[in-house]
Structures are given as C-alpha cells and as structure tokens.
Amino acid sequence: MTEEMYSVEQVADRLNLHVRTVRGYIRSGRLRAVRIGKQYRIAASDLDALTGQAPAATRASGPAEVSSIVQIDGVDRAAADRLGTLVLTSANTGHDQAHPLRVQTVHDEERHRMKIIILGDPAATAELLHLLDAVLNADNGLLDREVRDV
C-alpha cells in the first residue's frame, strides 16, 4: 500500500498557507517531509499529524458496535433455557441482517447465575436490553425465581 504524497505547493494550497511557511514548518521539524532531489514530499499521514486529524487507517469507517454483559442471579437451568431462547429469538428477528446481533448465553448451575453477552449495533442492542429489562421486571412466570439484574 503506497501512501499519498504531496508537494510543498500542494500542502500550502490545502492549508491556505504561503509556500515559505510550509518550508519553515519542514525546517523546524514541525512538519515531517522527505527530500527527493531538490524537492520535499510530505506524506498524507504527516500532514494529518500537523493538522491534528486522525490518520485515515484509524478513522471510524463503519457503524459503531456495542458490547454488553448482563448478569442475572438466581436462575435455574430451566429458566436460563427459556430466557436464552427468548433472547436469541429476539436477536435473530427484526433487525438489520447486514449487521446482525451476536448473542451468547452462559449458565453457571452451581451459582444459579446466567450471563448474556450481546455484541452489535447500538440501537438493536438497546432494544434487546429493553426487552430483557421488561421480562426480568415482569411477573409473567418466565423465570421461576426472583431474578435480579446485575
């Protein structure tokens, strides 16, 4: 992958500066440049560093992703299975199929504890968390025991 290189004149035009000012930045070390023959060339990443912009490789290039872990205490195996089925079904329906939610459930039988790990789009994750909140705080018989969201 080759990085785009600019001449002193191109940098001056981009920054709306005089050519002598750009050369002064180079001489003082404020702007990194490579000398090729009698001319300077400035890499795009060095120009970004001077202007305070993030390099192109580190700029956000897609949708944001959220990761959430929900821990629920006081859950037996049967309740964990029912809750896991509900969460997985909800995650797999009605969302953008190009960016699906990824959900994993884990049940610790000794501690009667369940963890639900959710990775995905912020809006879809929030929707799933709202569903979980409604189910955990409702008296609908889905969970046999008193459940506490941690």
Image: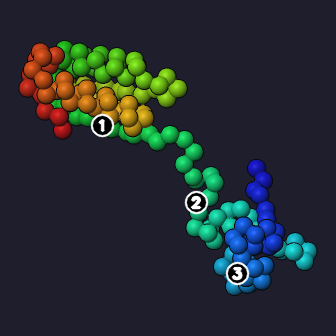
Measure how far apart labels 2 and 3 are at the Cα level.
Answer: 19 Å
Q: 113 above or below 64?
A: above
Q: Which mark is residue 54?
A: 2
Sort mark 1 into few (<14), some (14-19) or many (20+) by Cα contacts within 10 Å. Answer: some
Is residue 5 depicted above or below 39 in this figure? above
Q: At x 70% / y 81%, what residue is drawn?
A: 25
Name the side, left or right, on which 40 lies relative to 79. Answer: right
Q: Position of residue 80 (x, y in %)?
A: 22, 20
Under circle 1, the secondary element is strand
Q: Residues within 10 Å of mark 3 (few under 14, many from 20)?
A: some
Which residue is under mark 3?
25
Q: Which colour assignment does the render follow? A: rainbow
* The quarter of the displayed image where residue 77 is located: top left
Label 2 sits on a secondary structure element that is loop
Residue at figure coordinates x 62%, y 52% from the top left: 57
Residue 114 can be seen, yes or no? no
Q: How busy is the neighbourhood of tag 2: few (under 14 within 10 Å), some, or many (20 plus)?
A: few
Single out the mark in the foreground, 1 or 2: 2
Label 1 vs 2, first from the N-terminus: 2
Q: Is residue 64 left or right of residue 33?
A: left
